[in-house]
Amino acid sequence: MQTQTIMDSIQEEKKPYTLKDFVWIAFVVLGSIFAYTQYSSLMDVYEVGILIGTAASMIWLGRFWPSLMTMSYWVAGMSLLALWTYSSHGNVIETKETAFFLKFLVSSESAIMWMSALFVLATATYFLALFNKSEFTYKTATTMVWAAVTFGLVGMMVRWRESYIINFDYGHIPVSSLYEVFILFAVLTGLIYLYYEVKYNAKALGGFVMLVISASVAFLLWYHFDRGAHEIQPLVPALKSYWMKIHVPANFVGYGSFAIAAMIGVAYLITSKALQKNPNSAFAAKMPSLEVMDDLMYKTIALGFAFFTIATVLGAMWAAEAWGGYWSWDPKETWALIVWLNYAAWLHIRMSKGWRGNPMAWWAFVGLLITTFAFLGVNMFLSGLHSYGEL
Amino acid sequence: MSNTQPTGKKVNKKPSQIMNFLGSMNLAVTLLVMLSIASVIGTVLQQNQSFQDYIIKFGPFWTEVFNSLGLFQVYGAAWFILVLVFLLISTSVCVARNGPGFMKDMKQFSEKLSQTAIKHQTNNRQFNTDISLDDQQKVAQLVLEKHGYKTKIHQRDDGSVTVAGLKGSWNRLGYIFTHISIIVICLGALLDSNLLLKYRELTGDLIPETRTVSLDQIPKTSWVGDENISFRGTVNIAEDQKSDVLFLPYDNGFLVQQLPFSIVNKDFRIQYYDTGMPKTYESDLELYIPGREEPIRQTIEVNKPLYFENYAIYQSSFSDGGTKLKLNVHPLLAPVVAPLELDTAINKVEPLKTAHGKFRLELDDFRNFNMVPMTEEEKAATGRKFHNNGPTITFKVRNEQGKAWEYENYVMANKQEGRYFFMTGVRQSAAEEFRYLFIPADAKRSKERFFKFLAILNNPQRVSRIFQEQYPFTEDMDQRTYALQLRLVEQLMTVFRRSGFAGLTQFIQTNVPKEEQEKVSDYYFTQTTFALQSAYMALLREEGVVKSIQDEISDFDKTWFEDALTVISSLSKYGPPMYFEIDSFQQVQATGLQITKSPGKDIVYFGSTMLIIGVFFMFYVRQRRFWVNIKPENEKLELTLAAKDNKNLPETKTEFEKISNQIQTVSKQA
Ligand code: HEM
């Protein structure tokens, strides 16, 4: 038999480039060039590098997960609408109170409110779907998460621009204060969850994962209304670095993944308890199988661990440049190490002892408590070099 | 025993018990957990505080216990280092034992795996085909290669053929990378640690300095030189000054590090946001290196250090570098305006001999800006959110017993409720907030009138004379009563100056019988006010603001009077009777540099890169094997397919199904 025939008879493995992909590539490339021509005077060589890197990863990500393309078009469209509204009103911050679109939709504050509302609604809707087993309800919930993520990203993009409008000196990417990173956390956790939901048909886990996001939204709202944390503040000199643009997002991919792992752990524990009581439990039947949850827990922790490793290393490099030492046993640094060691131990135990199931689920949940302390507790209770986002 | 198990024990070489223990995963996990717990302690228990602080917090017993456990310096404690060393050993043993096996495993196709073993893999399938053995072999090979497997053919004695596929062997490399990287990072960190200093301290060769004394008073035992291969310390250099030493924090004190070059701070610049927060700061540095003609000139700023050989110089902070000050020290009890002029600078200590004892003036700090948020109305009026209250100096006045008052004085007058005041804050300990006096500015926006007025009040006889001038003796008065009244004015003024209106009230309470207090009090306060007003009128006349005491005085002068009395009435709570007026200043700033020598840094970075690459290989490359055993059997071919993944994941099964199906369909079609 001819080699060729055999090959032909095997289904094509590689995804071909379609028109959609070309549009996407053109969009990302043009968008990056536009950003470069507009803002290159504000970038140093590393930031140009980051722009190129972002564009390349977006092209790859879009093809890897096409839903991201659609979302990006929405984010770009709405952000441009906001920017255009500001610029047509002479780029003054008060426009956000007067211009209709800004006031009700796309000023950073409004967009973040929409994001918050949608995440909370999605949480309820996922649980409703779990209860009434309706495919349609699930679809609605998923759409809400997509919309929430979109609004969150729009909020961040617009906030970035607003920081320059308020006072040119203040301008910075919105990943510098506790308020800002909470938005980032909600968005990234939402996105990572959506990826696993589609890939592993794990929508029954939606409600559980959205619970953490809702909790972070609750904190965000309290922080906004009680503490006025949404006010854009200028950056301290130590934070004025391109490192922030990569260190913080990498960290939050880690935090987000760990949070998802923990909530899957909770779902796992509840399901396994239900099965223990009644092997034909109706609740368990609605949930993904224990094996799938166990595997997802491993996958999210692995993803989180990989990104957290990167983030910690980048953080060390940044510290070396800003504080003159790559490791100072500063509380935030030390807690990052603790989080990291904890998950390293988790992975080792799973690997070597082959532990699965309940103990690992508990451990994943405890992992979230440790992570939360590293993320929030350190800022609240311990002081150190990292005390930028104090409560 | 299957040879796909790389960690499988070799029967001929029994590893010793100790090696087994050291390389065990149990020990690894235990060490990881121990490190975490130690780290937690290090963050929860504040490190490197003074002993007194700990005793206040934990009591002497627990302080002793904690201290002997090294909990106040966890990261330098012997047991902490020991855990690290064990982790290093454990990881090394682990790599040494597993590494070679993993390396071999990377290249191993396991094509000789017995047919029974293939049949017993978790993922397996059997079916028959009726094409030629050659074709079948080719089909299997091509399909596997199409999926990215490398293949190897094994001809068996019984006439059957095994096509073995291997994919993703980098996973194993990932393991090796990750674990070696841990070793590399630890070694790099060890190189950057202060083990050498610890050793010298143990041998008594090195004693950290704990006093604040000038450089030439620090004994040689607190100095370190070139032999110190790694350090990290700080130094402040004022503008146009130079330094060739560095201060290394060590235990509860510090060490002085001699640098092989000297650094000159040519200029220091700082920019502020409108909130008064520093926006950027930078220093123009010159590095003079022995044996080099030209210095290295570079401007450094936060996040943009200067690298020179093994050294790195960072902009880390800033402070006052000895701002030059001209001060007028006003004695607050003197009957004349005769300030003492003082030429001094920040960071200096000046002895002061006064009529009220000897004092030390310690000039602590100078700030060029003091930004305060504006009120809503001001914001609306000016469009600005912050307002600059101008420069301040902070200083302490210490008496001979060592008791100190700390002050914060503003150079310029600031507007409060529409009037201008010179603010001066005082407190007796750093834990308190400053309490402010608001000295009212006169029409020239100066303190001139205030000190003149004060000088008059400081001389009760003069007040009494002024009183006498303004209300001369007339015939209808009783001579004795008039004389008594003049005496009373003098007395009241003395009490008022000593302790203000509050003092007056107290004077009445202690000296006047209870039933008469109310009446007397009314009278005394009227008289005091009368006297103060007379003194003030006299001053106004002297200034030429009014012609006679019958003239109407302006609202400005009226409120000035009230404001001045508020201040003078509380002067007694202001500490030693001196006011320090800033006549002029010339700011000198100092740059705060952090200098490191860190030979291990690149090693740590190298290890970190390896770690990241390794982690990705380990998680996202799965090592997969596939076997297709083709056995001719009664004119047909009997196929046994099996797959194995180094991690058994749900994907393994789906992939196996997919590849098997493809082999099956293609074989059928052929
Ligand atoms: C700080 C120290 C260490 C770190 C951060 C670390 C990290 C890791 C990670 C992330 C994995 C991957 C787990 C997975 O694929 O799910 C792993 C696997 C492994 N580690 Fe470690 N490790 C450390 C020390 C050690 C030590 C001391 C040993 C020796 C007992 C060891 C033995 C292993 C083994 C045998 C594997 C499994 C490799 C495989 O079969 O794929 N590790 N390690």
Image (cartoon, coloured by chain):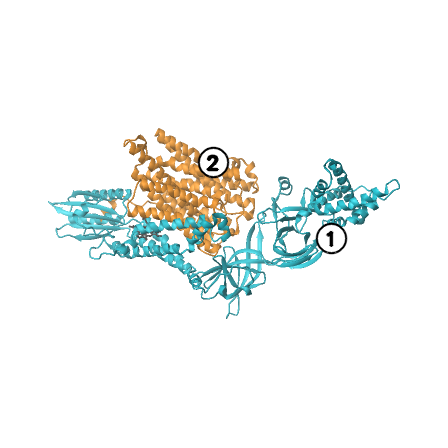
The image quadrant that residue B601 belongs to is bottom left
Q: Judge left or right: residue A338 versus residue B266.
A: left
List x then y, in percent, for residue B654: 26, 42
Q: Which chain letter goes with mark 1?
A: B
Q: Secondary structure at mark 2?
A: helix
List x then y, in percent, for residue A3: 22, 49
Q: Judge left or right: residue B46 versus residue B590.
A: left
Q: Which chain letter goes with mark 2?
A: A
Q: CA distance from mark 2 to mark 1?
A: 69 Å
> Which residue occupies the foreground of this view, B475 or B383?
B475
**Which amino acid is tagged 2?**
Trp
**Residue at the extreme left:** B634
Query: Which residue is identified by label 1?
Result: B334
Would you say the residues marked 2 and 1 are in contact, meaning their CB atoms lie under 8 Å apart? Answer: no
Question: Can residue B519 be seen here?
Answer: yes
Within 8 Å: ligand 1 and the Cβ of disc 1? no
**Pointer 1 local density, CA inside 10 Å: few below 14, some 14–19, many at least 20:** some
- Chain A visual colour: orange
Circle nearer the viewer, 2 or 1? 1
Callouts 2 and 1 in the same chain: no
> Which residue occupies the foreground of this view, B375 or B83?
B83
Q: Secondary structure at mark 1?
A: loop
Query: Which residue is identified by label 2?
Result: A114
- Chain B visual colour: cyan
**Residue at the extreme front:** B513
Within 8 Å: ligand 1 and the Cβ of disc 2? no
Q: Judge left or right: residue B8 versus residue B390.
A: left
**Which amino acid is tagged 1?**
Ala
Q: Judge left or right: residue B88 versus residue A27.
A: left
